Amino acid sequence: MEELYDVRSKSVHKGTVGSRSWGWVPSEHLLMAAWVFPLAVKLLLQRDGHYTFSDQDQDRALAVDKLLAVADWGERTNGGTDPQKWQDIVLSTARENTIERIKEQVLKQYPHLCAEASPGE
């Protein structure tokens, strides 16, 4: 968080981030800061009882580690016809999380289905 803030601050207030080497190029830092800072504020507000994380907030939070692990976020997948890598990561994370939420709701609503299933089914 501190590094993301530092790059953003230097970019906005001093106009340069060249005085230090960074883990990513400045545009990647700024993109990640724009992604993470609102989530961090929402988490703090939720902790204090002023906000409830939405499903979309949860999807975005779950995508953070996946985004941090990928280089060249702005490149398009499959030769330039598909969404950019970061968009693909966010969309696939949201799909996975939606499927998990649906599974949890079904198991909560129909607990006997889980109890009746035998291993290997």
Image (cartoon, grey):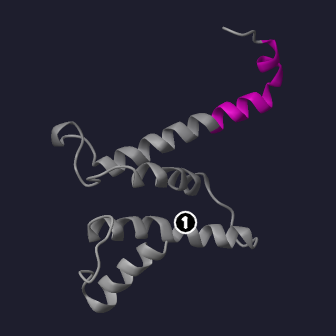
Expressed as whole percent of the image width and height from the top left, the position of residue 112 reads: 83, 19
Quadrant of residue 5 within the rendered picture: bottom left
Residue pictured at 29% horizontal, 91% vertical: 14
Look at the magenta stretch and give its main secondary structure.
helix
User: Can residue 113 be found in the magenta stretch?
Assistant: yes
Vertical arrangement, residue 78 with respect to residue 69, above or below: above
**40 lies above or below 105:** below
The residue lying toward the viewer, choosing from 25 and 75, is 25
Amino acid found under the numbered disc labelled 1: Leu
Task: Please give the residue where the numbered disc 1 appears in the rendered image.
Answer: 39
Q: Which residues are magenta?
A: 101-116
Horizontally, residue 46 falls left or right of residue 34, namely: right
Quadrant assignment for the C terminus:
top right
Decide if residue 70 is on the left or right side of residue 60: left
Say left or right for 41 vs 112.
left
Residue 35 spot, x, y in % from top left: 44, 64
On the image, the x and y values in percent for residue 76 come to 22, 46
Residue found farthest to the left: 79
Is 68 colored magenta in this rendering?
no
Residue furthest out toward the bottom: 14
Secondary structure beneath dot 1 equals helix
Report whether 27 appears left or right of 40. left
Give 19 or 58, whichever is nearer the viewer.
19
Label 1 Cα neighbours within 10 Å, binned few <14 / some 14-19 / many ≥20: some
